[in-house]
Amino acid sequence: MPNWSEINLDVLQLILERLSIRNRLNARSVCKNWYRVSKESLIKVPWMIIFPSRKTKERSCQLFDPQEGRFYELNKLVNDFYSSQCIATSGSWLLMFDFGSRFYVLNIFTRERINLPPLKSHQGRIFVKKTRDKLGRDNFMLRIRQSSITARNALNQTKAVLWVDELTKNYVVVWSIGLLYMMFTKSGFDNWREIPTREGPEILHGCQDLVYKYNKLYVLSKQNRIRILDFSQELPRANSDNVYHNPFKNDGKGRAMIIGVTVSGDVLIVKNQLKKIFNIFKMGLEGTRWDRVKSLGDESWIADLGVTVRASVNGSKPNSVYYCRDMNVYCGDISTRSQVIQKYFTSLKLGCVRLFIPTL
């Protein structure tokens, strides 16, 4: 009889990556080797977390596993969805923001919570003024020089990224407020700080999109230029090159552009035009131009997460782009340059849908 605990570890990893998350958790109990490999193997299928509408008093949200085609209900993930909002994900971690000017990071499965510094600790040009709405709930205003914006309006125009190390729980959080002001915090900080570069908001003139990977923050400005900030040290440092070439200059008006980073570290850009033909470009090696991408090979671009993943047998399709808009999941086929809507839910009272890749 074969000894299944001595199966080749590379083969075992390939097997485990095809299993559902429930079966993979069960596989942990087989033996020490299976436990170790199951922790190291990655889930390559993006899940969805579906938050209830703020207009309801619902206190539960839904998880959808597309590999099994199954919904799971999460009860009381947060106390109040009316005053809390998820603005970014990293693995099974959510970056949550409530309108009392508090940020925290929350694990979907373990409910572990990491409290972030309060906004009033910020070191920079921003001033935070706490207020109360007509119902007596906490709210706040953000004031930058002579401009003011409410928290709810800021979140409608915001971009944020979250990165959490699953082993050490070290984290990095970057938030752009109202597309004009960028700040960050990380493990060991007791405050928020403005991005301290000469190529800051005045040069970027706004932030269309953010991606964080391999200790680097990729920023797409309103002029469609890329800034890369190195976060490997205590304070981020900006690389000197900008991409001035705009591949969509003659396309006329359309939706905002989004960027991503491939498994190998290449930077991608696409113009987000729903139900229309789209083109994807990759930043050239010298960082001064965009080259058209004809294929992503066996990778899928999860646009809402800003990264590509290796397509799996029972999960995401290779050479495709996935993202959520207007409570729908869109899948774009790069080879045919067309998109289709994948409707997974129709009867749920939706408030917000976020893609995430579960981690064990």
Image (spheres, grey):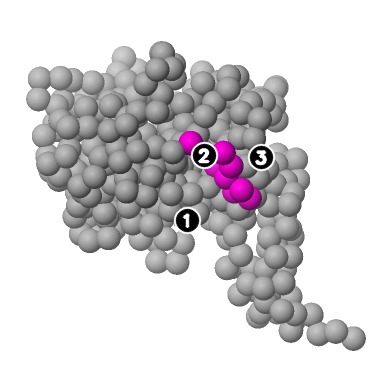
Q: Is residue 178 above or below residue 36?
A: above
Q: Quadrant of residue 169?
A: bottom left
The stretch in magenta equals 292-302
Residue that label 3 marks:
64
Q: Amino acid at mark 3?
A: Phe
Q: Secondary structure at mark 2?
A: loop
- Specify few, some or many for label 1: CA neighbours under 10 Å numbering under 14, 14-19, or 20 or more: few
Q: Position of residue 292 (x, y in %)?
A: 48, 36
Q: Quadrant of residue 8?
A: bottom right
Q: Position of residue 108 (x, y in %)?
A: 53, 48
For the residues labelled 2 and 1, the Cα–Cα distance comes to: 14 Å
Residue that label 2 marks:
293
Q: Amino acid at mark 2?
A: Val
For the residues labelled 1 and 3, the Cα–Cα distance comes to: 29 Å
Q: Position of residue 188 (x, y in %)?
A: 24, 60
Q: Amino acid at mark 1?
A: Ser
Which disc number belongs to residue 264?
1
Between marks 1 and 3 in the image, the one whose residue lies nearer the viewer = 1
Q: Position of residue 315 (x, y in %)?
A: 70, 47
